[in-house]
Amino acid sequence: MPESFRLLVKRATQVVAVCGGGERFLSGVAAQQLVVIENGGVVVGRDGLVKAVGPTDVVESQFRGATFDKIIDASGMVVIPGLVDSHTHPVWAGDRVHEFAMKLAGATYMEVHQAGGGIHFTVEHTRRASPEQLLGSLTQRLTRMLRAGTTLAECKSGYGLELDTELKMLMVIEKARAMLPIGISSTYCGAHAVPKGSTEAEAAQDIVRVQLPRVREKMTLGELRVDNIDVFCEKGVFDLDSTRAILQAGKAMGLQINFHGDELHPMNSATLGAELGALAISHLEEVTDEGIAAMAKSKTAAVLLPTTAYILRLPQPRARDMLDAGVIVALGSDFNPNAYCCSMPMVMHLACVNMRMSMNEALAAATINAAYALGRSHSHGSLEVNKQGDLVILNASRWEHLIYQFGGHQELIKYVVIKGEVV
Ligand code: NIG
Ligand code: FE
């Protein structure tokens, strides 16, 4: 009996494996060097894992006599790993298009927030929404991400700020995980803002004493899978001490630390993250030199979010300083009602133009390093044997078209493949 496999992709002009040799991230000079195979092929097995990556003739001779459920002749096309979006807030009701106009007219993010809009506006709408409504909009948004090449996305709660709505959001994420092919890393973000009518201390106490124990109970019962814990560590939101207490409580129940820090003010979040062994810190527009050094040493990934700096006209995150210091730089869309962008190709474009990353660095940041920021780089983020068979096939002569052609990925992305299945 010939052995059978799920997928053979052959004759691709380029297969961009991103990473070879099993590295879990690319930093420093390594982030500049991608593994590119000309006239390449990929085989994915029935278990959804990559069985071979290499020149087409080598792959074909290795699998001579085998059968494949699907064969894609990728002549004139390019294969890259599935993109990973390491920071999104995709579960919410009530858009904020009216606030976009206010911000264009000069209102700052915090002015809108302190006037009761921003996250508070979304919280009111999300609390009132039914799980079915939230699931409907979440699946649409995740499908949009998938069409733009994202095969693994982080999804946060954080528009409830009280137990019932936070659980409702996490359960909706859980349902989407079962319904859609896209991979999901789920994040409890109950400390996204201090709810109206509470003090910061009361909110932190509610999270540590009420919300997290209930989340843990649901995880133990197998009703929920939560991967990460997040806090918005910011002046006027959660200070360093409450952030530490909440993150430590999450870590004690096995969650990976991945939080918002140093966005609008320098908060020493990077140093705190290093101290707590955080997997990742997002934003970092206001990070200090000490923070950069601490993150480089502790191997805490910096999740940079070019859409936020762009929309809010913030200083650009110091991607070059971080890369030069050896920080593991990842990218995320930050999809949320403030930054309405589901497209990682657009994010990579902004990272290159506004943050001065090279295209190679941007692709590493949107694949292997984004997977690292989610604790998934052993299984995701590059095309290597035994990793998950997630890939994107582009109708282009070189992979860089994905970044160069901004805003037009619908024509460019020919196939999105997850675990060897075209989705
Ligand atoms: O990452 N900064 C905090 N959280 C989100 C924005 C959420 C919102 O405005 O709804 C962010 O940009
Ligand atoms: Fe965010």
Image (tube, rainbow, N blue to C red):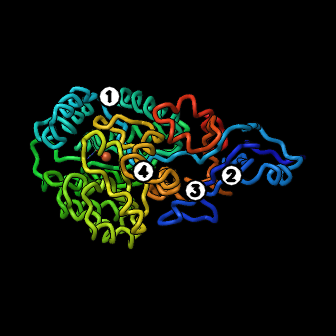
Q: Residues within 10 Å of mark 1 (few under 14, many from 20)?
A: some
Answer with mark 3 or mark 2, whichever residue precedes in sequence: 2
Q: At 23% from the left edge and 56% from the top edge, which residue is drawn?
A: 233
Quadrant field for ligand 1: top left
Residue type, mark 1 in image? Ser
Q: In the image, residue 311 lies at what x, y percent? A: 28, 39
**For numbered disc 1, what is the local secondary structure?**
loop
- One can see residue 267 in this view: yes
Q: In which quarter of the image is residue 279?
A: bottom left
Q: Which amino acid does label 4 sit on?
A: Leu
Name the residue that disc number 4 marks: 331
First in sequence: mark 4 vs mark 2: 2
Identify the mark nearer the N-term, 1 or 2: 2
Instruction: Look at label 2 and name its amino acid.
Output: Val
Judge whether 276 appears above or below 366 on screen.
below
Q: In which quarter of the image is the C terminus?
A: top right
Q: Position of residue 323 (x, y in %)?
A: 41, 63
Which-is-in-front pick, marks 4 and 1?
4
Q: Inspect this view and state whether residue 186 appears.
A: no
Q: Report the residue marked by disc 3.
A: 379
